[in-house]
Image: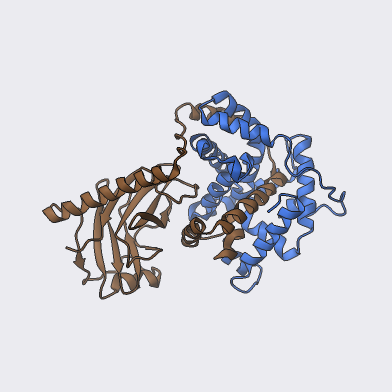
Chain colours: A brown, B blue
Amino acid sequence: MHGLSGAYAVDALDDLERARFERHLTECPECRAEVESLTEAASLLSDTTSFEPPASLRESVLASIETVRPLPPVVADLTARADRRRRRFQGLVAAAAAVTVLGAGAAVWQPWQESQPSVVGAVSATDEVLNAPDAERFEMKVGKQTVSVVRSAELNKAVLEAPELPPAPNGHAYAVWLQHDDAMVLAGVVNADDDTSAILLSGDARTADGAGITVEAAGERVSTPSPTLVGSVGFEQA
Amino acid sequence: MDHVTPVPAGTPDKGVPAVPAHTAELNGLLKQAARGDEAAFARLYDATSSRVYGLAVRVVRDPAQAEEVAQEAFLEIWRTATRFDPAKGSATAWMLTIVHRKSVDRVRSAEAATRRDVSYHEQNRTIDHDATADAAHASLEAHRVRNALGSLTPVQREAIELAYFGGYTHTEVAKLLDLPVGTAKTRIRDGLIRLRDTMGLGA
């Protein structure tokens, strides 16, 4: 893992590697420090490509910021804020689970039998999870669309199936999180152009208590979910 | 990759202060922008737009798309300015990280890949004039960076350029350079460490 810091600093990781490495970064201060210094070094390369933009860019940038409110600052007490987020998230996961109990439908647990790999030529690891004998499917609503997380405890892997997922708003990406007790762990990032029919999630799916999808600024390195939760589901068994 | 060919036998690096004098100023402008100060953001734009746009053009190649990318990046910088933490690096590096990620995302989408090939030659011709508008500072800095790049091994330099300017993943870089799988990331890291140390950025 440590060896990926350079490739990370120049955006030379694929999405899955990036998500994994970002998870590693949350636990490894040495890598964080190295990434910071290498990012600084990489940014120097742009000094060699300096090029004056057309005047129209200035006008359109300055016009567009007028319509956008800057994000509020991250408050000083990070722990309290993170806890609040987690509680809110857990509350939503709990609410989703309650809906299941009432039979109203957002979350369902079903042994996954009629496996139909939805993508031709999909990564075999994805098919492996979808076809696993112990695969369980959990559904959540994102907007009007149903999105599934298929988990195989045996394989300790999960797949996000979201063929109908609308693209994230301009300049944004979806982040998929697995919940482990109090912690939200980044399990994948869905960019606007990504094929969402079946996405292998990283992390320990077996021990996860639930999953959620948030909207994050594209290109931002996230380690905690933003408050913009668009869907969540608990992995409680019926 | 011509732009980053090292300048031969230039002035040896004399340990010029690694932090450009205006770093503090840019940090300050970004901080003001975070409070919604549009005038400060306009000044920040003027101080950085050549680097932002130049990087986007270098990676994306198509000027129209590069302009879109730069526009999106500036908007993102404005929106997320409160997330900038000077303890973790300079405002410039933070901004360029956003620009670079957006540029790379753009070229990795298949549609854009087709489009940039079409405009490759046209754009290259334009860029070769090296019409940088950033005055003395940028060219001095560029000179130091080119010198520092010259101290890397050819493989380190190529790997970094393919990744940073080409937008390739380290796996693709390994393939392009006929390196065993998994070694390109090491070359990139070693090269960046060397670049960092030569430029006096500290660990």
| Quadrant in the picture for the N terminus of chain A | bottom right
Percent coordinates x, y for residue B88 in the rendering: 59, 45
Percent coordinates x, y for residue A137 in the rendering: 24, 64
Residue at 85% x, 48% y is B14
Is residue B131 in view? yes
| Quadrant in the picture for the C terminus of chain A | bottom left
A53 left or right, relative to A197: right
- Total marks shown come to 0
Residue at 45% x, 37% y is A75
Q: Quadrant of residue B163?
A: bottom right
A135 left or right, relative to B78: left
Q: Which residue lies furthest to the top in this view?
A: B39
Name the foreground residue: B48 vs B116: B48
Q: Is residue B31 above or below residue B195?
A: above
Name the foreground residue: A98 vs B76: A98
Is residue B45 in view? no
Percent coordinates x, y for residue A162 in the rendering: 31, 56
Residue at 50% x, 27% y is B36
Name the foreground residue: A128 vs A4: A4
Percent coordinates x, y for residue A64 in the rendering: 49, 30
B77 left or right, relative to B202: left
Residue at 54% x, 42% y is B69
Q: In which quarter of the image is residue A156?
A: bottom left
Q: Residue furthest left?
A: A102
